[in-house]
Amino acid sequence: MVLTHLGANLDGWDPRILEGLSQDRRVIALGYRGVGESTGQVRDSIEEMAADAMGAIQGLGFDRIDLFGLSMGGMVAQAMAAKAPGSIDRLILASSGPAGGPGILAMTRVMVSTVLRAAVTFTDPRVLLFFTRTPAGRLAAREYIVRLRERRSMREKGVSPGVYRAQLAAVHRWGRQQPADLSVWSGPVWIVHGDSDRMVPPANAAALAGLLPAASVTMYPDSGHGAVFQHHSAFVAAARDFLRR
């Protein structure tokens, strides 16, 4: 199961990542309540999103799953691991941080200011939020935006301002909380981060590793919040190897 980042519907997933992971396993991309084609009221707490995801797992009839959480999705995945450790086999946390992690409270300010700058410069905000402004980062951003437009049919409704407000509030609460006791879940964990992430500072990778007994960390160079999008080929290859029994 894959859980996406703040302010995204399922069309925000890089198709190279979902296609790559699905080569040898079933991939379930779960939409958050009230986002895209998912019905109901959008959640404003990480714990509520985690409860929804656990309900989906049970509704689909799974006893155990592998779980990949990106950014806010990684926070939801942590809450799931803390509450129902027996339901998760292997865990990938990308561009995410623990409750109370370094700099997470600033995520709202960074996101709002960057979205405003993107509007003034007629730039897709994901270009500025997810990628560095180096030549490699700019190229990766352009290629990512092109990939997102590949699928023309069955696209989801756009993300409303109300979704952004609720999810920003959820992340802000997460930033104020004390770290959860993640030692209750002792399975394999792979932590992935970009070394120039402005939204969730890189120090969060080490903070997460300190809470998870069996964690390994990969830090991608010259990469921002969208490190897994920029390095999609390397990420997919390593993820498939990590998830392989």
Image: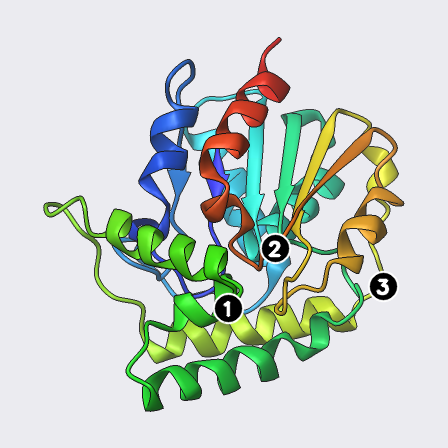
CA separation in Å, label 1 and label 3: 33 Å
Q: Position of residue 85 (x, y in %)?
A: 73, 31
Q: Secondary structure at mark 3?
A: loop
Foreground residue, 70 or 149? 149
Q: Which mark is residue 133?
A: 1
Q: Secondary structure at mark 2?
A: loop
Q: Which mark is residue 222?
A: 2
Residue 113 lies, with reference to residue 176, above or below; the image says below
Count of marks overlaid on the render? 3
Residue at the disc numbered 3: 178
Q: Secondary structure at mark 1?
A: loop
Residue 9 is at least partly visible in this image: yes
Q: Earlier in the sequence, mark 1 or mark 2?
A: 1
The quadrant where residue 139 appears: bottom left
Label 2 amino acid?
Answer: Asp
Label 3 amino acid?
Answer: Gln
